[in-house]
Amino acid sequence: MSAPSPNPLMVLGTSSGAGKSLMTAALCRVLRRRGETPLPFKGQNMSNNAWVDQAGGEMAYSQALQAWAAGLEPQCAMNPVLLKPQGDSTSEVIHLGQSVGSCRAEHYYRDWFRPGWAAIRSGLSDLQAAYPSGRLVLEGAGSPVEVNLQPRDLTNLRLAQYLRARCILVADIERGGVFAQLVGTLALLRPVERPLIRGLLINRFRGRRELFNEGRRWLEAHTGIPVLGVMPWLDELFPPEDSLDLLERRGRKRGAELEIAVLKLPSLSNFSDLDPLEAEPTVQLRWVAPGEELGNPDAVVVPGSKQTLRDLEALNTSGLGQALGHYAASGGQVFGICGGMQLLGRELHDPQRLEGGALSTAGLNLLPLRTTFGAGKALRQRRSRALWPAIPGHSSALELEGFELHRGITELAGDGVAEGAAPPCQPLANDDALGWWQPFGDQGGVVAGTYLHGVFESGPWRRRWLNQLRQRQGLPPLSEQQPHHSRQREALLNRLADAFAQHVNLSPLITP
């Protein structure tokens, strides 16, 4: 007879942004080192930062990161309900990897509570069937004591009670008011819920931990719950948990030689595409929102968009779209990813009004592309050989890999030549539906785009793209012998787990 599964663990937070996602990832890596099979799971997540699993299912990127920390292949069962904000209090609803509709916030629990709970139970069943001896490691959402939402809670204490999970409550001391965060959260728990909390965790503490000893003793005496640890502020660059965390990335890197502007679109999605560039020591990213000056960076990246037509309107009304055109015409380098590439095209057609705008809209006309939006989504992992960029003396083709996650079919429009361009548009990869590039203007400008999320994760390709920017500035080339970004991500996860193992006592959670 097989041994029973270990007790599920759950990471709750006193608020959004308390560090639940990374603490869950750290817990998964530490348990894996102990010989266990941790199973990351977040019943419901709200995020436009997504991943596509091998079966073509859509899930939150944070659960993919936790799967890698656990040594597992990400699968959408780990995040059975994903809500993707579309603006105007509306979200697309993803169940078990597939889009099942959209809803307004005020109707969500009325219309989607029962189907959501069914999807969560199905995801749990799939995971436990695939890994019968695994230990569920659950992540909560926001705060578990939003009193207006508690009766219809899908992913916090309802799930903890259902699974009899042992919970750890995380508070971010960097935000201030850590005692009120913890005591207030515990005070709002119902009597049946409070015994679920087995430990408290103080996150992002700066300075000597001994300075918090008195606070630790007070918390334990006042709450009767052990403080499992005090996690230090880690001076590492981890993937942000949501787009608000991008605002914290303002530091100037020492030794940065290239500045790359990234358009901070109102409906920004899949910003994790930029993590490999952020990790490059010689690259400084500068996020530029509509209404801010574009300046004269070495390149501009137009990232993914959840609402392409709305973001296009924001660029046009703010003047940032026109500034991007002037930048390309004066010799600038522009690179669009997914919705960012669609924005750069000549025509965007929305015959079913899926994006809520006009039937047809003119794009920025920096690439001769026509995009037609349809109800179906492209959801698949892809591999192809890169045909661009080509640098003299580097003739070898480089492999690209990533995933597609988009609505819309894009093709060359008309003669395949953008206004102000010279030669016809060329495919970026052997698979000519993955992207295109084109010289622009008579001053050496280049505009390119791809549907491939994760394009910068390929170390050799990323370095080749950077080297053509460096060549323009007279800088020496960087080595293309660079591993896939997943190697660097693994190193970061290991350092996170090292700190967690050093500063957090898990015994109250995992002792039978």
Image (cartoon, helix red, strand yellow):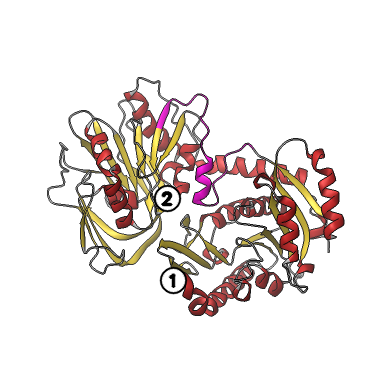
Q: Horizontal and vertical percent for residue 466?
A: 39, 32
Give the residue furthest to the left: 415
The amino acid type, in three-letter code, at marker 2 is Gly
Asked whether 449 or 324 is in front, the reply is: 324
Disc 1 versus disc 2: nearer the observer: 1
Q: Which quadrant of the figure contains the N terminus?
A: bottom right
Asked whether 131 or 1 is in front, the reply is: 131
Residue at the spot x=52%, y=25% of the render?
254
Q: Examine the structure image and report whether residue 114 is included in the region drawn in magenta.
A: no
Vertical side of 193 occupied by 476: above or below = above
* Residue bearing the label numbered 1: 104
Which quadrant would residue 397 be assigned to in this image?
A: top left
Please say whether residue 448 is visible from this viewpoint.
yes
Q: Is residue 289 left or right of residue 417?
A: right
Secondary element type, mark 1: strand
Magenta: main secondary structure equals loop
Marks 1 and 2 sit apart, C-alpha to C-alpha, by 31 Å
* Residue bearing the label numbered 2: 402
The amino acid type, in three-letter code, at marker 1 is Arg
Q: Determine which of the numbered discs, if any, sits on residue 141 in the image.
A: none
Q: Is residue 58 left or right of residue 506?
A: left
Vertical side of 470 occupied by 406: above or below = below
Which quadrant would residue 136 be assigned to in this image?
A: bottom right
Which is nearer the N-term, disc 1 or disc 2? 1
Vertical side of 167 occupied by 369: above or below = above
Q: Examine the structure image and report whether residue 252 is included in the region drawn in magenta.
A: yes
Q: Horizontal and vertical percent for residue 104?
A: 44, 71
- Say if mark 1 contacts mark 2, CB within 8 Å: no
Secondary element type, mark 2: strand
- What residue span does the magenta drawing correspond to? 235-259
Q: Which quadrant of the figure contains the C terminus?
A: bottom right
